[in-house]
Amino acid sequence: MKNIETFTVDTKQQGAEKLVELISNELKANRLQVFGLATGSTMEPVYDQLVASDLDFSQVTAFNLDEYIGIPADHPNSYAYYMNERLFSKKPFKKTFIENGMAEDLDEECVRYETLLKENPLDVQLLGIGENGHIAFNEPGTSPESVTHVVELTESTIAVNSQYFTEDETMPVTALTMGISSIMQAKKLVVAAFGENKRAALEKLFAGEVSAEWPVTFLLKHSDVTIITDLKF
Ligand code: F6R
Protein backbone atom coordinates (compact mmCIF):
# COMPACT_ATOMS: atom_id res chain seq x y z
CA MET A 1 0.00 0.00 0.00
CA LYS A 2 1.67 3.16 -1.16
CA ASN A 3 0.35 5.44 1.57
CA ILE A 4 1.26 3.02 4.36
CA GLU A 5 4.79 2.17 5.37
CA THR A 6 5.10 -0.75 7.77
CA PHE A 7 8.02 -1.55 10.06
CA THR A 8 7.96 -5.01 11.58
CA VAL A 9 9.94 -5.38 14.79
CA ASP A 10 10.59 -8.33 17.11
CA THR A 11 9.55 -6.77 20.38
CA LYS A 12 7.44 -3.94 21.75
CA GLN A 13 10.64 -2.38 23.08
CA GLN A 14 12.18 -2.35 19.61
CA GLY A 15 8.94 -0.90 18.29
CA ALA A 16 9.17 1.92 20.79
CA GLU A 17 12.77 2.56 19.69
CA LYS A 18 11.66 2.81 16.06
CA LEU A 19 8.89 5.16 17.02
CA VAL A 20 11.26 7.39 18.95
CA GLU A 21 13.59 7.41 15.93
CA LEU A 22 10.73 8.58 13.69
CA ILE A 23 9.75 11.29 16.15
CA SER A 24 13.36 12.38 16.46
CA ASN A 25 13.64 12.68 12.66
CA GLU A 26 10.54 14.86 12.49
CA LEU A 27 11.72 17.04 15.35
CA LYS A 28 15.20 17.52 13.92
CA ALA A 29 13.81 18.32 10.48
CA ASN A 30 11.66 21.01 12.09
CA ARG A 31 8.45 19.25 11.11
CA LEU A 32 7.07 18.80 14.62
CA GLN A 33 5.47 21.89 16.05
CA VAL A 34 2.23 20.21 17.07
CA PHE A 35 2.32 16.64 18.31
CA GLY A 36 -0.75 14.47 18.81
CA LEU A 37 -0.34 11.96 21.62
CA ALA A 38 -2.08 8.77 22.72
CA THR A 39 -2.23 6.90 26.02
CA GLY A 40 -2.58 3.19 26.78
CA SER A 41 -0.08 0.39 27.34
CA THR A 42 1.32 0.65 23.80
CA MET A 43 2.68 4.12 24.49
CA GLU A 44 4.29 3.35 27.86
CA PRO A 45 7.70 2.25 26.51
CA VAL A 46 7.56 5.06 23.95
CA TYR A 47 7.23 7.72 26.65
CA ASP A 48 9.87 6.00 28.80
CA GLN A 49 12.28 6.24 25.88
CA LEU A 50 11.33 9.82 25.02
CA VAL A 51 12.00 10.79 28.63
CA ALA A 52 15.37 9.01 28.55
CA SER A 53 16.31 10.70 25.26
CA ASP A 54 17.92 14.08 24.80
CA LEU A 55 15.09 15.26 22.56
CA ASP A 56 13.83 18.76 23.28
CA PHE A 57 10.05 19.31 23.16
CA SER A 58 10.10 22.74 24.76
CA GLN A 59 8.96 24.31 21.48
CA VAL A 60 6.33 21.63 20.79
CA THR A 61 2.61 21.84 21.58
CA ALA A 62 0.91 18.56 22.50
CA PHE A 63 -2.68 17.45 22.02
CA ASN A 64 -4.04 14.23 23.47
CA LEU A 65 -6.57 12.11 21.66
CA ASP A 66 -9.06 11.39 24.40
CA GLU A 67 -10.14 11.54 28.04
CA TYR A 68 -12.71 9.78 30.21
CA ILE A 69 -15.79 11.69 31.26
CA GLY A 70 -16.36 12.16 34.98
CA ILE A 71 -12.95 11.55 36.46
CA PRO A 72 -10.78 14.53 37.36
CA ALA A 73 -7.29 15.21 36.02
CA ASP A 74 -5.74 14.19 39.36
CA HIS A 75 -7.40 10.76 39.30
CA PRO A 76 -4.73 8.11 38.59
CA ASN A 77 -6.85 6.60 35.82
CA SER A 78 -7.45 9.82 33.94
CA TYR A 79 -5.47 10.28 30.77
CA ALA A 80 -4.39 13.72 32.00
CA TYR A 81 -2.75 11.99 34.98
CA TYR A 82 -1.17 9.32 32.75
CA MET A 83 0.39 11.99 30.54
CA ASN A 84 1.67 14.08 33.44
CA GLU A 85 3.14 11.09 35.21
CA ARG A 86 4.78 9.49 32.20
CA LEU A 87 5.82 12.41 30.07
CA PHE A 88 4.96 16.02 30.79
CA SER A 89 6.37 16.18 34.32
CA LYS A 90 9.67 14.79 32.98
CA LYS A 91 9.90 16.37 29.52
CA PRO A 92 8.78 19.95 29.26
CA PHE A 93 6.50 20.86 26.36
CA LYS A 94 5.60 24.35 25.20
CA LYS A 95 1.91 23.71 25.89
CA THR A 96 -0.21 20.62 26.45
CA PHE A 97 -3.89 20.09 25.78
CA ILE A 98 -6.32 17.33 26.67
CA GLU A 99 -10.11 17.30 26.68
CA ASN A 100 -11.68 18.20 30.01
CA GLY A 101 -13.82 15.24 30.99
CA MET A 102 -15.18 17.23 33.95
CA ALA A 103 -16.53 20.08 31.84
CA GLU A 104 -20.04 21.12 32.79
CA ASP A 105 -21.06 21.49 29.17
CA LEU A 106 -19.47 18.61 27.29
CA ASP A 107 -20.68 19.72 23.86
CA GLU A 108 -19.11 23.11 24.43
CA GLU A 109 -15.91 21.38 25.52
CA CYS A 110 -15.85 19.42 22.25
CA VAL A 111 -16.22 22.63 20.23
CA ARG A 112 -13.49 24.30 22.29
CA TYR A 113 -11.09 21.40 21.69
CA GLU A 114 -11.81 21.15 17.98
CA THR A 115 -11.26 24.91 17.63
CA LEU A 116 -7.88 24.58 19.34
CA LEU A 117 -7.00 21.80 16.91
CA LYS A 118 -7.96 23.98 13.95
CA GLU A 119 -5.72 26.75 15.31
CA ASN A 120 -2.85 24.32 15.90
CA PRO A 121 -2.86 21.81 13.03
CA LEU A 122 -1.34 18.48 14.01
CA ASP A 123 1.99 17.63 12.40
CA VAL A 124 2.31 14.09 13.72
CA GLN A 125 -0.36 12.05 15.49
CA LEU A 126 0.54 8.92 17.44
CA LEU A 127 -2.10 6.22 17.47
CA GLY A 128 -2.65 2.91 19.18
CA ILE A 129 -5.37 0.53 18.03
CA GLY A 130 -8.13 -1.07 20.09
CA GLU A 131 -8.81 -4.78 19.77
CA ASN A 132 -12.07 -3.83 18.06
CA GLY A 133 -10.24 -1.57 15.62
CA HIS A 134 -10.97 1.72 17.37
CA ILE A 135 -8.61 4.65 16.99
CA ALA A 136 -8.68 7.13 19.84
CA PHE A 137 -12.13 6.30 21.28
CA ASN A 138 -13.76 6.19 17.86
CA GLU A 139 -15.62 2.93 18.26
CA PRO A 140 -16.99 0.79 15.41
CA GLY A 141 -19.67 2.65 13.50
CA THR A 142 -18.14 6.12 13.95
CA SER A 143 -18.57 8.46 10.99
CA PRO A 144 -15.46 9.47 9.04
CA GLU A 145 -16.77 13.05 9.28
CA SER A 146 -16.67 13.02 13.09
CA VAL A 147 -14.82 15.72 14.99
CA THR A 148 -14.22 15.87 18.77
CA HIS A 149 -17.28 14.32 20.39
CA VAL A 150 -18.76 12.42 23.32
CA VAL A 151 -18.69 8.62 22.98
CA GLU A 152 -20.21 5.70 24.75
CA LEU A 153 -17.52 3.08 25.09
CA THR A 154 -18.29 -0.38 23.74
CA GLU A 155 -18.36 -3.57 25.83
CA SER A 156 -15.06 -4.58 24.23
CA THR A 157 -13.27 -1.36 25.23
CA ILE A 158 -14.76 -1.45 28.74
CA ALA A 159 -13.63 -5.06 29.16
CA VAL A 160 -10.07 -4.24 28.04
CA ASN A 161 -9.65 -0.97 29.94
CA SER A 162 -11.35 -2.02 33.17
CA GLN A 163 -8.15 -3.87 34.11
CA TYR A 164 -6.72 -0.46 35.09
CA PHE A 165 -9.49 0.25 37.59
CA THR A 166 -9.59 -1.34 41.04
CA GLU A 167 -12.63 -3.32 42.17
CA ASP A 168 -14.16 -0.49 44.16
CA GLU A 169 -13.72 2.02 41.34
CA THR A 170 -16.31 2.34 38.62
CA MET A 171 -14.84 2.69 35.19
CA PRO A 172 -16.34 5.54 33.16
CA VAL A 173 -18.38 4.28 30.22
CA THR A 174 -18.29 7.58 28.36
CA ALA A 175 -15.39 9.64 27.07
CA LEU A 176 -14.42 12.62 24.96
CA THR A 177 -12.43 11.86 21.85
CA MET A 178 -11.03 13.53 18.78
CA GLY A 179 -13.08 12.33 15.82
CA ILE A 180 -11.93 10.45 12.76
CA SER A 181 -11.86 13.68 10.77
CA SER A 182 -9.84 15.47 13.50
CA ILE A 183 -7.26 12.69 13.35
CA MET A 184 -7.17 12.56 9.57
CA GLN A 185 -6.18 16.26 9.47
CA ALA A 186 -2.76 15.39 10.92
CA LYS A 187 0.00 15.56 8.33
CA LYS A 188 1.53 12.30 9.46
CA LEU A 189 0.03 9.37 11.37
CA VAL A 190 2.25 6.97 13.29
CA VAL A 191 0.46 3.85 14.48
CA ALA A 192 1.80 1.27 16.91
CA ALA A 193 0.22 -2.16 17.41
CA PHE A 194 1.89 -4.80 19.53
CA GLY A 195 0.61 -8.23 20.52
CA GLU A 196 -1.71 -10.88 19.10
CA ASN A 197 -4.84 -9.11 20.34
CA LYS A 198 -4.24 -6.44 17.67
CA ARG A 199 -3.99 -8.92 14.79
CA ALA A 200 -7.63 -8.80 13.71
CA ALA A 201 -7.58 -5.00 13.47
CA LEU A 202 -4.35 -4.90 11.47
CA GLU A 203 -5.61 -7.68 9.21
CA LYS A 204 -8.64 -5.55 8.37
CA LEU A 205 -6.38 -2.60 7.62
CA PHE A 206 -4.06 -4.59 5.39
CA ALA A 207 -7.04 -6.11 3.59
CA GLY A 208 -7.41 -2.65 2.09
CA GLU A 209 -11.14 -2.09 2.40
CA VAL A 210 -12.49 0.95 4.27
CA SER A 211 -15.29 0.11 6.69
CA ALA A 212 -16.72 2.04 9.64
CA GLU A 213 -17.02 -1.31 11.44
CA TRP A 214 -13.21 -1.21 11.76
CA PRO A 215 -12.36 2.48 12.28
CA VAL A 216 -8.64 1.76 11.80
CA THR A 217 -9.39 1.16 8.11
CA PHE A 218 -10.12 4.89 7.67
CA LEU A 219 -6.34 5.28 7.75
CA LEU A 220 -6.33 3.83 4.23
CA LYS A 221 -7.59 7.25 3.13
CA HIS A 222 -4.66 9.15 4.64
CA SER A 223 -1.61 9.94 2.53
CA ASP A 224 1.12 9.40 5.13
CA VAL A 225 0.76 6.52 7.58
CA THR A 226 3.53 4.59 9.30
CA ILE A 227 2.75 1.38 11.14
CA ILE A 228 5.04 -0.22 13.67
CA THR A 229 4.12 -3.71 14.75
CA ASP A 230 5.58 -6.91 16.13
CA LEU A 231 3.00 -8.97 14.24
CA LYS A 232 4.10 -10.94 11.21
CA PHE A 233 1.58 -11.45 8.42
C1 F6R B 1 -5.61 5.97 23.98
C2 F6R B 1 -6.42 5.64 22.82
C3 F6R B 1 -6.78 4.24 22.47
C4 F6R B 1 -5.62 3.25 22.62
C5 F6R B 1 -6.07 1.85 22.25
C6 F6R B 1 -4.98 0.83 22.50
O1 F6R B 1 -5.41 7.36 24.09
O2 F6R B 1 -6.83 6.53 22.14
O3 F6R B 1 -7.27 4.20 21.16
O4 F6R B 1 -4.57 3.65 21.79
O5 F6R B 1 -7.19 1.51 23.01
O6 F6R B 1 -4.74 0.75 23.86
P1 F6R B 1 -3.49 -0.06 24.43
O7 F6R B 1 -2.27 0.66 23.98
O8 F6R B 1 -3.65 0.00 25.92
O9 F6R B 1 -3.57 -1.43 23.86
Image (spheres, grey):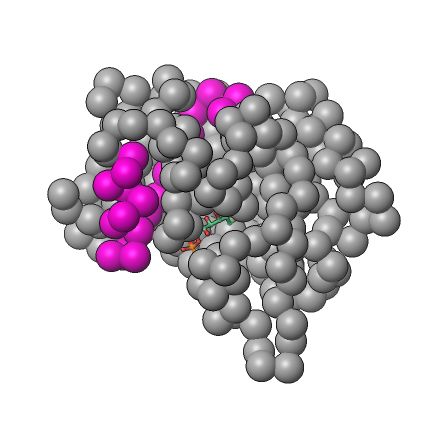
Q: For this view, does 89 lie left or right of residue 208?
A: right
Depth check: give the residue in front, 227 or 203: 203
Picture residue at 39% right of the left edge, 39% below the top: 214
In this rendering, the answer to whether 162 lies above or below 10 is below
The reply to whether the magenta stretch includes residue 199 is yes
Q: In this rendering, does residue 90 appear at all?
A: no
The reply to whether the magenta stretch includes residue 127 is no
Picture residue at 24% right of the left edge, 41% below the top: 203
Depth check: give the residue in front, 119 or 144: 144
Picture residue at 65% right of the left edge, 54% below the top: 174
Name the quadrant of the C terminus.
top left
Residue furthest out toward the bottom: 168
Instruction: Find residue 232 and report its horizontal and vertical position in percent.
Output: 14, 46
Instruction: Find residue 107 and report its horizontal and vertical position in percent.
Output: 78, 38
Residue furthest out toward the left: 233
In this rendering, the answer to whether 230 lies above or below 165 is above
Q: For this view, does 156 lie left or right of residue 176?
A: left
Q: For this view, does 141 lie left or right of residue 174?
A: left
Which of the 4 quarters of the picture holds residue 196?
bottom left
Picture residue at 50% right of the left edge, 44% below the top: 139
Depth check: give the residue in front, 17 or 167: 167
Instruction: Find residue 70 and report its horizontal and vertical position in percent.
Output: 74, 59
Instruction: Find residue 137 and report its horizontal and vertical position in percent.
Output: 54, 46
Name the quadrant of the N terminus.
top left
Bounds of the magenta segment: 184-205
| Tally of numbered discs | 0
Q: In this rendering, does residue 177 appear at all?
A: yes
